[in-house]
Amino acid sequence: METKQSDLLDTKCHLRLAEVAHSLLKMAPYDPMTMGCQGLQRYINEILPSPDWSHEDLRPALVNILRRL
């Protein structure tokens, strides 16, 4: 049985990670090195696509990130 990384994170973790990513994306226009940040890239490429975003409690995190992008 394969466990996805997102299965290990609860809603609170997803919301907090989205807040951190949102803060980094706010800085990106003023600091190009921020977009090269490995943590931000991993979040966008690995964690953001993984959860089942149809759950109502996760939607604020997704909406927050998509608005910033």
Image: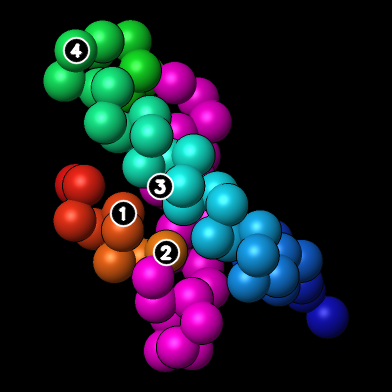
Q: Are marks 2 and 1 in contact (CB under 8 Å)?
A: yes
**Mark 1, residue position:** 65
**Mark 2, residue position:** 61
Q: Nearer the viewer, mark 2 or mark 3?
A: 2
* Dot 2 or dot 4, earlier in sequence: 4
> In which quadrant of the rendered view does residue 5 lie?
bottom right
Q: Predominant secondary structure in magenta?
A: helix
Q: Residue at x 38, y 34 (%)?
A: 23
Query: Disc 1 residue type?
Result: Ile
* Dot 1 or dot 3, earlier in sequence: 3
* Helix, strand or loop status at disc 2: helix
> Which residue is farthest right?
1
Rounded to the nearest angstrom, the CA distance separating label 2 from label 4 is 23 Å
Query: Disc 3 residue type?
Result: Ile
Query: Disc 2 residue type?
Result: Ala
Rounded to the nearest angstrom, the CA distance separating label 3 from label 4 is 19 Å
Indicate the quadrant containing the N terminus: top left, top right, bottom left or bottom right: bottom right
**Mark 4, residue position:** 30
What percent of the width, then of the height, locates residue 57?
51, 82
Question: Horizontally, is 41 left or right of 11 in the view?
Answer: left
Query: Disc 4 residue type?
Result: Tyr
Mark 2 is surrounded, within 10 Å at the Cα level, by few (under 14), some (14 to 19) or many (20 or more) other residues, namely: many
Q: Are marks 4 and 1 in contact (CB under 8 Å)?
A: no
What percent of the width, then of the height, locates residue 21?
43, 40
